[in-house]
Amino acid sequence: MDYYHDQKMQKLFELLTQPRTLEEMDLSSTFIKHLILKVIATYGNIKVNRIVQITGINVELIEIILREMEKEDLCAAVSGGFLFPSVEFTIKDLGYKQASKLMKENPYLGIAPVTYDYYFEVMEAQLKGRFPLKIPNEVKENTFKDAVGNEFAKKVLIESSIGGKGLFIYGLPGTGKTFLTSKMSDLLPPLIIPRYIEFSDQVIQFFDPDFHRETPEQPDDPRWVKIYAPFVFTGSELSTNKLETNYDPNKGVYETSPIIKANGGVLLLDDLGRQKEDHKALLNRLILPMENKKDMIYIKGSPVIVHSHFIPVFSTNLDITIMDEAHLRRAPLHIFLETPSISDILKVFKLNLNALKEKYDPQILEVYEKVYLPPYNGGEGLQPTFAHARDLAQIAQAIRIGKGEKIISTPTMEDALQQHVLIALQRRLTPTLFDRIIRKKNLG
């Protein structure tokens, strides 16, 4: 679809070809040489094609560098065939001494970074004029195809994505706040980011496989990666320190914060108000990145400006007043999620059973429905949540497998309900219909 690979993206693909000469390469020959030297020293003996795999540098460029390193008595070819990629190199004494010193200064081994200036130029070209978006109907429908109910919430999420505006989503636990918000990044177009960038000979990691999903098509230069718009999730564990870019001495890289990883996508602060640290301090830390679409990080004490063009989403089951006006201005849209209907809960339960490829006795749906029906309709009157539907499908499956049954039976469903901690607790705390009638008579 053109939405995921439009003309701007196609043009970037044409520009991001793998450099084959030092003149085409944005990195200095010294940086490349040091990287290759550390690789050879680490492996002892290594073939050229393996160096190519590790560094992402074109074999023609690696041949130029290795020939120079041979002349400097840093390494030597020890075996190999007619083709250069099959040639095996080893480290020499002088090379090992240099590599040992380099490893102490910067132990990074891996794919070659792109320069900071190159990163900034490519990112600026992608993010300039990103909003407002024109999201195709097909994308909207596909994004929410498995999201039951909450039509108003979906409408607001789409409007937030079109304009790039932040939002505040609140409501009782289990109403689908995190699930719905996680869908939001699918409404946004993809972008290309560097895996790593180089600044003053230091390496900064940008690509994080925990949050960044690669698209099927990729640029010719493997130092760049095309990703779907990221959804970066933070919760009660968040602290101001985790919102900073910190150095990892074991990997030899600066690991970027959620603020930067969310660039081009969505940053969710979930369970706002439940962090150990004052949530206002966290929100204050986000004001400038939200306002300027850029953040300041420090590399060996030097300030570096990086892109932070994300849509902020704040989620809580506390009162909206935990955010003051200054913070709400950065998230002007809002969604209040009410308790889901029983019919929607049943739809989600069936969707989860189907996703698990579970066969079941249709009567289990009646057993499940009875849990939420009001007492005057013969039910238990418990509080319905979407989280129950997901968990119960998985619990019922586990019990069925344990019993050796072919389908989920009504007794198995009863067992699943009894084993779900929140339902079991509600059953203990919720008076029976008989108790309610007696209490009402006594009060009368």
Image (cartoon, rainbow, N blue to C red):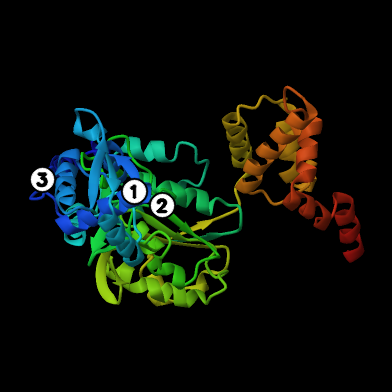
User: Residue 16 at x, y = what percent?
Assistant: 17, 44
- Which residue type does callout 3 highlight? Thr
Name the residue beneath numbered marker 3.
21
Give the mark nearest the N terminus, 1 or 3.
Answer: 3
Give the CA distance from mark 1 to mark 3.
32 Å
Q: Choose top left, top right, bottom left or bottom right for residue 268.
A: bottom left
Mark nearer the viewer, 1 or 3: 3
- Which residue type does callout 1 highlight? Ala
Whether residue 17 is visible to the viewer of this picture, yes or no, is no
Mark 1 is surrounded, within 10 Å at the Cα level, by few (under 14), some (14 to 19) or many (20 or more) other residues, namely many
Q: Residue at x 43, y 73 (%)?
A: 283
Name the residue beneath numbered marker 2.
231
User: Residue 42 at x, y = what percent?
Assistant: 36, 51
Give the mark nearest the N terminus, 2 or 3.
Answer: 3
| Mark seen at residue 176 | none
Q: Quadrant of the N terminus?
A: top left
Please say if the residues under marks 1 and 2 sit with CB atoms less than 8 Å apart. yes
